Structures are given as structure tokens and as C-alpha cells.
Amino acid sequence: MIRRAGYSLAGLRAAWRSERSFRDHLAASGLLLACMAALQPAGWWWAVIVLAIACGWAFEAMNAAFEALCDCVHPGRSPVIGRAKDMASAAAFIVNCATAVLAMAMALSAVAGL
Ligand SMILES: Nc1ncnc2c1ncn2[C@@H]1O[C@H](COP(=O)(O)OP(=O)(O)OP(=O)(O)O)[C@@H](O)[C@H]1O
């Protein structure tokens, strides 16, 4: 159990070091959490947004792992690899868009006092 958690932390470190989009994502998450601390939305918003942020991190990590695997298995250019990477990127993009919509809804409801 502890050994497996160590592998996971090593994976997080690798994603942090090698993937700019992963670092950008963590920075955006910190900013969103800081906005929430300032806006003080209803308690359930914290659960929803933290879950969305965690999904975003997970998808970014999976996307980074998939890209690394593609580059290892097929180092040269290939339209199939390009499409596969685009689709993995689209998966992370969808989660990030959903998080952005939730963040806007949270901000509106906090400002409106709901
Ligand atoms: N081997 C390849 N063959 C063809 N197209 C590729 C290849 N590698 C990357 N691409 C294209 O370049 C895009 C960016 O790929 P790259 O591996 O550089 O990811 P990245 O810059 O880290 O992107 P992300 O922000 O999604 O992490 C891919 O989505 C794909 O369209």
C-alpha cells in the first residue's frame, strides 16, 4: 500500500517535471481555490469543485502518461499517433471546460448569495 502510494507520488513528480500543461493546471486549481476562499460559497460547492479539480488532475496525468507512451512506442511522426494524442487531449479539455462552467456557476451563486 505505502509502496504503491510511492509509485503514484513518483508519477505526480514526473508529470510536474515534464508537463507544462500539468503545472499550468495545478496553478489554475490554486487560483480557483483561492477565489473560493474569498467568495465563501455554500459548503456543497466545495465538494463539487474539489471533485472537478481532482478529475482535471487525473485526466491531465493520464494525458501525460499517454503522450509519454506514444513517444516511446512510436518516436517518429505519424497521423495515427497525432490523432490519438489529440483525442487524449480532448478528454482533458472536456473536464477542464466542465470545471470552468462549474466555477462560473459557483461564483454567480456566491455573489447572488445562494
Ligand atoms: N508523433 C506525432 N505524430 C503526429 N503528430 C504529433 C506527434 N506528436 C505530437 N503530435 C501533435 O502535436 C500535438 C501536441 O503533442 P505533444 O506530445 O507535444 O503534447 P503537448 O504539447 O504536451 O500537449 P498537451 O498540452 O496536450 O499535453 C498532438 O496533440 C498532436 O496533434
Image (tube, rainbow, N blue to C red):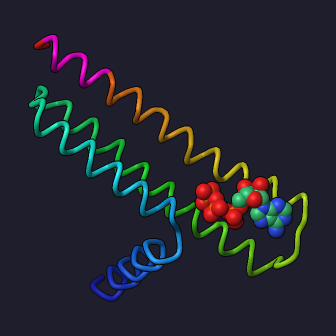
Would residue 38 be counted in the magenta stretch? no
Where on the picture, by quarter, is residue 43? top left
Residue at the spot x=40%, y=73% of the render? 12
Residue 19 horizontal/vertical position (percent): 52, 68
Residue 80 horizontal/vertical position (percent): 88, 59
Q: Viewed as shown, does residue 55 lie left or right of 92?
A: left
Residue at the spot x=44%, y=57% of the render? 58
Residue 34 in view of the camera: yes
Q: In which quarter of the image is ligand 1?
A: bottom right
Q: Which residue lies furthest to the bottom in this view?
A: 3
Q: Is residue 35 above or below residue 5?
A: above
Screen quadrant of the C terminus: top left
Residue 7 horizontal/vertical position (percent): 40, 83
Q: How many labels does the image show?
A: 0
Identify the magenta region.
105-112
Residue at the spot x=69%, y=75% of the render? 69
Residue 81 in view of the camera: no
Q: Look at the magenta stretch and give its main secondary structure.
A: helix
Q: Viewed as shown, does residue 110 lie left or right of 97?
A: left
Would residue 109 be counted in the magenta stretch? yes
| Along the line of sight, the residue nearer the viewer: 100 or 52 | 100
Screen quadrant of the N terminus: bottom left
Residue 91 horizontal/vertical position (percent): 60, 46
Q: Viewed as shown, does residue 29 lie left or right of 66?
A: left
Residue at the spot x=56%, y=43% of the render? 93
Q: In this view, does 69 lie above or below 7?
A: above
